[in-house]
Image (cartoon, rainbow, N blue to C red):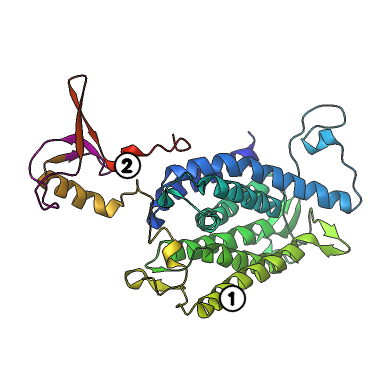
Amino acid sequence: MNWYGLIIAFGIVVCVVCAYFTAKHRGLEGDLVIDLIVICLPLAILGARTYHVVFSVMAGEKWTFAQFFGFGLDGSYQGLAGLAIYGGIFGSLLGALVFHFIKTRKKLPENKRVNFWQIADLGFTFIILGQAIGRWANYSNLEDYGGVVTNPAWQWFPFAMNVNGTWHYAHFFYESLWCAIGFGLLFWLYMGKRKSYDGFIISCYSIFYGLGRSVLEAMRAQDVLMLGGVRVSLLVSILFVVGGLANIIAHIALAKKNNKKVFIFVDQGKLDASYYGYESTKLFKPMPDIVFFKDRKAKKEQAARDGITVDESGVVIKLDGGPHKDTPDGKTNVKAEKTNDKQSVKTSEDDYEDKWDD
């Protein structure tokens, strides 16, 4: 059984499912996650492969076009041995950028648009979970380990791993644990009552993962990409930390420049236009199809009082008639039409057709 592929696939499925049900917390449609993975996953795989091959070539190795796609010199398929996580991250960012342009089309209503930072915050909250799971795929291949553990007292799993009879530091486990802690932190920041500006989550990811990888990279002894005598992952990790800090500092500077409050760790109940960047978030202007789980019961009860039947998501499915208490004249704002002797219900949302979502 190909445990490597199975574990990677499991990690992807877990992240997609969790992201789907989490998206609504920030006013995003769950289906957006499905559209996003269709674009980002292929680019992430391509980025991971390209990153590995490019730096291998720069280090003096030779690659053929066929080898890039996993074929050996004899023409047989040998798999994509050599996928770098940082390359996958860059591919995912490219996918988020592509999705940004798709979802900011001028013909879309403003509340149907999604920008790059909103996509990145949602995505990287769960990408780090995928990394925590994916590192166990390295263990299945007995790769991603550190130096030799010579003290018998420390030759036990998961502190160390046995590779062909020799005990090595279990680098894969250390990074998996670090990413699991990071996921807990980012999920709390994303789902907690205190909110921050769009782009804060990916900044925290960059700082947290970059710091951890910078330390752990020094322990790694197997399959290390080098550039000019320096570990490539170490250089990229430092750039991630710098980039994350720069993003946060830029937000603080722009908030002060525009005479606004800094939008970091703010109680959601106290958010208003005085916080820099709040009015551009989905917390302020959620997508129109969003019905938060906690609001569904209240919406159904209100609809019943108004003589309207709604489904589990709070969407109107039948007009029963009766007074509508929210309008001065007692009339409902839902339009009914006769179609083939059956009553159909239309709302103002039906006047807009989003062909991308369809």
**Residue 310 lies within the magenta run:** yes
Q: Secondary structure at mark 1?
A: helix
Residue 304 drawn above or below residue 70:
below
Q: Quadrant of the C terminus?
A: top left
Q: Which residue is mark 2?
A: 349
Residue 80 placement: quadrant? top right
Measure the alpha-carbon separation of dots 2 and 1.
40 Å
Q: Which residues are magenta?
A: 309-333
Q: How far from the left and from the top, in percent, is residue 65? A: 84, 35
Q: Quadrant of the N terminus?
A: top right
Considering depth in this image, is 169 or 73 the residue closer to the camera?
A: 73
Considering depth in this image, is 96 or 217 the residue closer to the camera?
A: 96
Look at 12% across and 36% down and name the residue there: 320
Considering depth in this image, is 348 or 235 the residue closer to the camera?
A: 348
Look at 10% across and 37% down and name the residue there: 321
Residue 267 drawn above or below residue 199:
below
Q: Residues within 10 Å of mark 1 (few under 14, many from 20)?
A: few
**Residue 151 lies within the magenta run:** no
| The disc label shown at residue 249, or none | 1
Upstream in sequence: badge 2 or badge 1: 1
Q: How far from the left and from the top, in percent, is residue 177? A: 58, 61
Does the rendering let one see residue 204?
Answer: yes
